[in-house]
Image (cartoon, grey):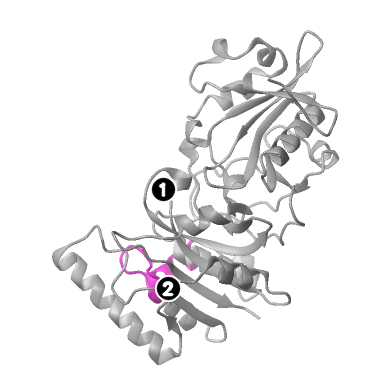
Amino acid sequence: MPHPVPYAVTYAVVPYAPGAGPSAWPEGLRRIARPEVLERWGAVDRTPHAPRLLAVPGDGGWAAAALVTARPGTAYAKIVDAVGDVPAAARAVVAYAEEQGLVQVVWEGWTVSGEDAAAAGFAPLRPPLPGGTDEPVGPRTGYVRWTAGEGVAEPAYYRQSTHFSCGAVTALLAQVRAGVVRPEALGREAELTLWRDATNFPACEPVGLGVAVRRRWPSSSVEVFLDTEEPVLLDHLDGDEREWRAVLQRASRAEADRLGVPVHGRRLSLAELREAVEAPGRCRHVLLLVSLATMQGFDVPHWVLCHGAVPGAVVVEDPWFNTAAGETWVDAHLLPVADASLDAMSLFGGEVRVRGAVLIDGA
């Protein structure tokens, strides 16, 4: 049923059938959307992100529509494109986001102009830093509108160039935001050099990552939180493959003690995490180890950078996104993750779930 919304716009949520082809799309959509836009919409399987159409009715058909998606477990909605009466489509999406309790709407800049985005209350996002691969990152522009709170200061975005260097990239992004590293210095060489110093082959475990950060930037205050003394991220290994990595983790703990890096044998609470990134006058960041099971559908450990908070959500930078599901850098940048979701996804391991975090204070 159509929903009355605060902007004198009525809209309907229409199921989107990916892969069905243009002939299966509603006639109202085909009348207002250019063929190349519909072709791009159907070029990937967006099913993991619950794609839906928000349609604004007009005289004898649709006046406007927007394709909207979002990662599961998050607190945002993404406009892939708005067609027809673009301002009306944008108003409908913002109203929908507010009704759903979402804190943010982002807009991929495939077809929208900066002027139209600004008129709808959206601010331009900083373009991503050049990455270390030739894989496209999506549109050159993107836009954001916060629906809860005042938003957070925007850091630079950089996409990791390998499947295993997320820990190094989040540390580098934290130091770029703190002014310790120049943005132009962030590239594949910097990424892989720090990864080589931090890796447990191929993953970066919390203590090793914290030690690598302290060695690289001795003036930065670093603390590690890990509520186990056992080796971590080794559940998929056994025998000698597990043991030699465990030796390296014990060596990292010894190095942390030598360098004066505190390793707290307890879980960093969500309240403590929020307090850290919200501290006024401080430039504090939390590198947090999460499982991608909720957001991407596979239980793989992954580092994200927590750098701000808004009511009900922590704002992170995710250095990886899934192009096969239609994601672009706009999904992974300034990403608000609902508190309860982040609390759940930041537990990893086997039968005993633990949390790993590295707190960097750049103040």
Residue on which the image places disc 1: 293
Left or right position of 256 against 158 = left
Name above or below for residue 283 compared with residue 28: below
Q: State the CA–CA distance, disc 2 to disc 1.
A: 22 Å
Check residue 195 for magenta coloring. yes
Residue type at tag 2: Leu
The percent position of residue 207, horizontal first and vertical second, equals 39, 76
**Residue 209 numbered mark, or none:** 2
Q: Earlier in the sequence, mark 2 or mark 1?
A: 2
* Mark 2, secondary structure of its residue: helix
Query: In what quadrant of the picture does the C terminus appear?
Result: bottom right
Can residue 318 be spotted in the picture?
Answer: no
Magenta range: 188-208
Residue at 20% from the left image edge and 67% from the top image edge? 242
Q: Nearer the viewer, residue 139 or 7?
A: 7
Q: Looking at numbered disc 1 in the image, what kind of residue is underneath it?
A: Ala
Residue 33 image label: none
